[in-house]
Image (cartoon, grey):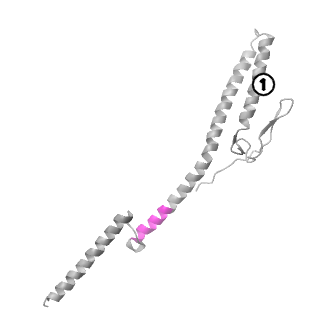
Amino acid sequence: MRVTPMILARQAVYFINQNADVINRSLERLGTGRRINRAYEDPPGTVLSMRLQSDIASVEGDYRRLEQVLPYIQAADTALQQAISVLQRARELVLMASNDTLTADQRSAIANELVGLRDELLQIANTKVGDRFLFAGSAILTKPFTMDADGNATYQGDSDQLFVALS
């Protein structure tokens, strides 16, 4: 078979078009920053990419939910640290009051401080974030602790737990 100039020209045009397609795909990849721009370019890679995009969307949703919960966790942590400090001070006062050498005035001062600590502990137990009480269980709009005239505290919340659904 004889190779004519026309065959050479067609072959050259074919290879030029092939190279132009490769260059165009490369430019598209550079422009989009993606290795796969069309599903037919890499079907298994497309499936993997779609699965990863779904996983990313799920993780981002979890992150948003956790961001919404974080202020409550931080406020609860702070409130519990304050409660620990109040209870430690109350323990110190009770130990101090058990000393037989204290005068009636000293015992009265300790009793007054313990009443103040009780009130402070009640205030901590009724901590709110926004319009929601932290320690009321699922009854987040109900003030969890109330105190009657005799100084007895009553729990008004419930024992339910609040959960955040994560995928």
- Name the residue: 69% across, 27% down: 86
Q: Is residue 37 magenta?
A: no
Q: Report helix, strand or loop for mark 1.
A: helix
Examine the rendering and report whether any part of residue 144 can be seen. Answer: yes
- Name the residue: 73% across, 36% down: 125
Seen from this angle, which residue lies furthest top?
Answer: 101
Callout 1, which amino acid? Val
Magenta span: 42-53
Answer with left or right where residue 52 lies relative to residue 120: left
- Name the residue: 72% across, 19% down: 93
Q: Give coordinates of residue 58: x percent, y percent.
A: 54, 58
Q: Give coordinates of residue 6: x percent, y percent.
A: 17, 88
Q: Relative to residue 101, is residue 45 depicted above or below?
A: below
Seen from this angle, which residue lies furthest right?
Answer: 149
- Name the residue: 30% across, 75% down: 21
Q: Give coordinates of residue 47: x percent, y percent.
A: 45, 68
Label 1: how many Cα within 10 Å (few below 14, some 14–19, many 20+): some
Examine the rendering and report whether any part of residue 34 can be seen. Answer: no
Q: Is residue 51 magenta?
A: yes
- Asked where in the image residue 135 lies, by quadrant, the reply is top right
Quadrant occupied by the N terminus? bottom left
Q: Relative to residue 44, is residue 155 depicted above or below?
A: above
- Asked where in the image residue 30 lies, by quadrant, the reply is bottom left
Answer with left or right where residue 42 lies relative to residue 165: left
Q: Give coordinates of residue 4: x percent, y percent.
A: 14, 89
Q: Relative to residue 97, is residue 151 depicted above or below?
A: below
Q: Which residue is mark 1?
A: 115
Seen from this angle, which residue lies furthest left?
Answer: 2
